[in-house]
């Protein structure tokens, strides 16, 4: 016979009791607050630093910069915009294009955050990006990271390059 854990059951019971005291007309507001609290894991002043993106031909020097938090995409993951080169964005896409299987973090053009997948609508049927990190992580991974893909202007690299990403609080808040 299956038995529900006591504390899990009490937590569920407490939540149901709390919700039963909320008027139905206000329930959608409560759910919205809870949803937004779950989606907004990165504070509005959060920023990322990308370092060590290198190509022998010099392509992509501007990738190495600070990226500031812009908000969340439909799946609740944060996305970031370049401070110096503002046409560069870091975001997660579960299905960028048919030739790019698996969800991953991208450095690419501005994502359309109203979409559930194929967020870069500026790239036609492909998956135009400067790098991708193959993972289903809810936030951008930190540290020295193996790249699944790196574009160097006239050629690409599969699985042979790495970069460094660090999270840092930033005075360049972009609300």
Image (cartoon, rainbow, N blue to C red):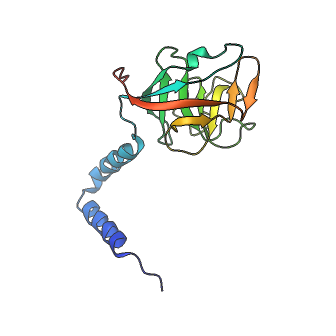
Q: Is residue 68 left or right of residue 143?
A: left
Q: Evaluate whether residue 112 shows in this view.
A: no
User: Residue 168, image x and y in percent?
Assistant: 40, 30
Q: Residue at x 36, y 34 (%)?
A: 43
Q: Is residue 103 left or right of residue 67?
A: right
Which residue is the extreme one toward the bottom?
A: 1
User: Residue 117, image x and y in percent?
Assistant: 60, 38
Name above or below for residue 137 compared with residue 5. above
User: Residue 26, image x and y in percent?
Assistant: 27, 50
Q: How many marks?
A: 0
Q: Residue at x 63, y 17 (%)?
A: 60
Q: Quarter of the image holding residue 12?
A: bottom left
Name above or below for residue 75 compared with residue 60. below
User: Residue 39, image x and y in percent?
Assistant: 42, 43
Q: Residue at x 63, y 27 (%)?
A: 121
Q: Evaluate whether residue 157 shows in this view.
A: yes
Which residue is the extreme one toward the left?
A: 21
Front residue of this view, candidates 152 and 175: 152
Q: Residue at x 40, y 41 (%)?
A: 41
Front residue of this view, candidates 158 and 127: 158
Q: Is residue 46 left or right of residue 132?
A: left
Name above or below for residue 23 compared with residue 126. below
Q: Quarter of the image holding residue 54?
A: top right
Q: Quarter of the image holding residue 125?
A: top right
Q: Quadrant of the C terminus?
A: top left
């Amino acid at each position: 016979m299956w038995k529900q854990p006591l504390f899990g059951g009490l937590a569920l019971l407490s939540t149901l009791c709390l919700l039963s005291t909320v008027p139905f007309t206000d329930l959608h507001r409560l759910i919205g607050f809870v949803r937004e609290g779950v989606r907004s894991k990165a504070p509005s002043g959060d920023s990322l630093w990308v370092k060590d993106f290198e190509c022998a031909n010099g392509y992509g020097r501007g990738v190495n910069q600070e990226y500031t938090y812009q908000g969340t995409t439909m799946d609740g993951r944060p996305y970031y915009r370049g401070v110096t080169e503002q046409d560069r964005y870091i975001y997660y896409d579960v299905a960028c294009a048919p030739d790019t299987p698996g969800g991953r973090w991208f450095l690419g053009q501005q994502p359309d955050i109203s979409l559930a997948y194929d967020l870069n609508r500026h790239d036609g049927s492909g998956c135009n990006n400067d790098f991708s990190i193959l993972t289903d992580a809810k936030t951008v991974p930190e540290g020295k990271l193996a790249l699944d893909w790196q574009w160097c202007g006239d050629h690409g690299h599969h699985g042979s390059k790495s970069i460094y990403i660090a999270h840092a609080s930033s005075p360049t808040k972009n609300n």
